[in-house]
Amino acid sequence: MIGGEAVTVVRVQSVTPELRTMVDDAVKRLKSHRGGPELLANIVGERSTPDFVAGLASRGELWTEEDEGQLRGFAICRSQLVEALYVSPAHRRRGVAQSLMKALLALEVPPKDAYALPGDRAMKSLYESLGWKARLLTMRGE
């Protein structure tokens, strides 16, 4: 229960139109954030396919958080790395990201690392609330 609401975190088995729309929104926002295009390139990398989202689902690397069937957020986690964590704007500041992270940390092989973009204090605070510490920053001169 999060804030009195029953929530479900599940590994995605099939990609719904609602999830595709949410991923598209996340990508759009990511592209406009400092460091976002580089992070997106890192996530997609050589794994780029015509249906990248379905590939994530088929490999068990995509997780969603829902409340009564309404999608509220998703996470991409592979090789013990949380590569992306996104919560729809309408559901932010309600414990959705924390719910996703707690579910990932309860996996048989939990993540040990996660990405956070420069200036994303909310994401950094989430990870710090779980006891994680920054251990690497990448700086770039342009």
Image: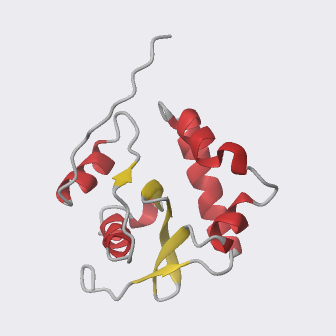
Query: Which sits in the foreground, 51 or 108?
Result: 108
Query: Which sits in the foreground, 23 or 57?
Result: 57
* In this rendering, position of residue 19 left or right of residue 119: right
Number of numbered markers = 0
At x 42% / y 60%, what residue is drawn? 80
* In this rendering, position of residue 125 left or right of residue 82: left
Q: Looking at the picture, how far across and down is residue 17, in whole percent? A: 71, 72
Q: Is residue 10 above or below residue 112?
A: below
Query: Which sits in the foreground, 74 or 6?
Result: 74
At x 60% / y 54%, what residue is drawn? 25
Q: Is residue 91 above or below residue 5?
A: above
Q: Residue furthest right?
A: 50
Q: Looking at the picture, how far across and down is residue 12, in whole percent? A: 59, 77
Q: Is residue 106 above or below residue 124?
A: below
Q: Looking at the picture, how far across and down is residue 40, in whole percent? A: 59, 42
Which quadrant would residue 94 be assigned to in this image?
bottom left
- Image color mode: secondary structure
Q: Which quadrant: the N terminus?
A: bottom left
Q: Looking at the picture, how far across and down is residue 138, in whole percent? A: 39, 27
* In this rendering, position of residue 73 left or right of residue 112: right
